[in-house]
Image (cartoon, helix red, strand yellow):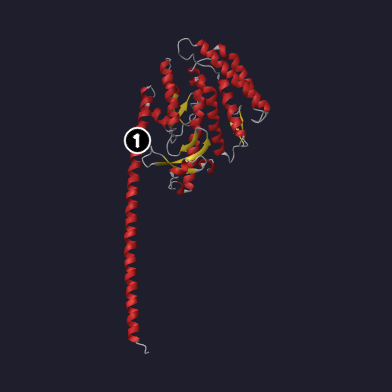
């Protein structure tokens, strides 16, 4: 049988033409797919931008309302805005002080003032740096005095609580002696509650139950207990954390665990100074953790745009066992315009997740 070279060439040309046609068709399909994907991404980005803009507008409105409340309660506008820079928690504390002062005939706004940074009090000859802006100053002593003196009926209990907490500082949480002392301390809280209930005949709270020293010792002891679990400790006299280097994340998580336990043990007694001091610890710790989150995102931008955890996985009982304290994840959130939010996992009962971008 002879070989037809022309037929062979013609067959090759036909096959080559078919391959080229298929490649062109595939290229057209790929182009359409890319364009569709780009259109989809552009649509999603526009929707996300609109949602973010709406959220910023909502947050700005809420912020202005909080600032307006402080101004309405007697605080100068510039001071109120300086307080607002410290977050929602700081505003909540300040509003509480202002409301308490108004109810009790005290100008609590006078405890929040704007002063020129760099000015040394008592030495007016010192020059003020012109570049330094006015800073917020909070008169903590004045605020404490506003809440009034502790009733004599609680004095003995306060002395015993301070003595117990001072002993606990030298013990570890696992020590049987520590546990026994803690039982005694909780019994004293119960007694204070019973006294308050017996004294209250009008349905209103009868004021302060803890002295400043008791508040400091109580909070310091619980913070120290939580810090010890991470190899740190709290110096009550200097009011500093010992062994903090390289463990700022763990220290702030320990503070929040302390907040949880302190509220469980003392909130029912409704002492204004104790409650405000615990809130201040919570506000400061969350602020520090958000700053930590911002640093993590700056160093690893992909954390901000990571995929949302599937809702089915998020509700599993063992979901949190797969997480690490301090880890940033995106979780479902029906209240968010985008349907999710970026959070830091804290592992603190009742405060498992910290919204990275909200000052709640």
Q: Residue at x 47, y 37 (%)?
A: 354
The reply to whether residue 115 is in sight is: no
- The answer to which of 250 and 15 lies nearer the viewer is 15
Q: Quadrant of the C terminus?
A: top left
Is 284 on the left or on the right of 188, as rendered?
A: left
x and y percent of residue 345 in the render?
A: 50, 40
Q: Quadrant of the N terminus?
A: bottom left
Can you tell which quarter of the image residue 187 is in?
A: top right
The reply to whether residue 317 is in sight is: yes
Q: Residue at x 60, y 33 (%)?
A: 227
Q: Secondary structure at mark 1?
A: helix
Q: Is residue 247 above or below residue 273?
A: below
x and y percent of residue 126 in the render?
A: 49, 29
Q: Residue at x 34, y 33 (%)?
A: 61
Q: Is residue 307 above or below residue 27?
A: above
- Circle 1 residues within 10 Å: few <14, some 14–19, many ≥20: few
Can you tell which quarter of the image residue 60 is in?
A: top left
Q: Residue at x 58, y 21 (%)?
A: 214
- The answer to which of 243 and 191 lies nearer the viewer is 191
| Residue that numbered label 1 is attached to | 58
x and y percent of residue 213 in the render?
A: 58, 21
Is 232 on the left or on the right of 288, as rendered?
A: right
In this rendering, the count of numbered labels is 1
């Amino acid at each position: 049988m002879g070989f037809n070279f022309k037929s062979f060439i013609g067959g090759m040309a036909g096959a080559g033409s078919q391959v080229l046609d298929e490649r062109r068709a595939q290229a057209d399909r790929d182009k359409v797919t890319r364009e569709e994907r780009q259109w989809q991404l552009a649509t999603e980005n526009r929707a996300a931008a609109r949602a973010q803009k709406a959220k910023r507008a909502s947050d700005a409105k809420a912020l202005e309302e909080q600032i307006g409340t402080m101004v309405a309660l007697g605080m100068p506008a510039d001071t109120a805005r300086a307080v607002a820079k410290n977050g929602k928690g700081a505003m909540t504390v300040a509003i509480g002080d202002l409301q308490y002062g108004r109810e009790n005939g005290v100008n609590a706004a006078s405890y929040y003032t704007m002063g020129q940074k760099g000015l040394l009090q008592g030495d007016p000859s010192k020059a003020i740096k012109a570049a330094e802006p006015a800073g917020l100053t909070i008169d903590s002593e004045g605020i404490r005095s506003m809440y009034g003196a502790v009733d004599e009926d609680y004095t003995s209990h306060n002395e015993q609580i301070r003595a117990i907490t001072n002993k606990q500082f030298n013990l570890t949480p696992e020590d049987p002696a520590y546990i026994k002392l803690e039982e005694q301390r909780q019994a004293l809280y119960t007694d204070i509650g019973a006294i308050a209930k017996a004294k209250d005949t009008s349905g209103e709270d009868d004021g302060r139950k803890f002295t400043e020293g008791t508040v400091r010792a109580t909070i310091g002891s619980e913070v120290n207990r939580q810090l010890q679990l991470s190899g740190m400790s709290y110096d009550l006299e200097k009011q500093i954390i010992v062994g903090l280097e390289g463990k700022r994340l763990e220290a702030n998580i320990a503070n929040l665990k302390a907040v949880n336990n302190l509220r469980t043990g003392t909130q029912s007694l409704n002492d204004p100074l104790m409650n405000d001091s615990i809130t201040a610890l919570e506000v400061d710790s969350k602020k520090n953790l958000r700053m930590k989150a911002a640093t993590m995102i700056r160093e690893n931008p992909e954390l901000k745009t990571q995929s949302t955890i599937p809702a089915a996985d998020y509700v599993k009982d063992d979901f949190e066992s797969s997480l690490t304290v301090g880890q940033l994840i995106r979780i479902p959130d029906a209240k968010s315009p985008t349907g999710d939010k970026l959070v830091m996992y804290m592992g603190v009962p009742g405060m498992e997740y910290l919204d990275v971008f909200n000052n709640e």
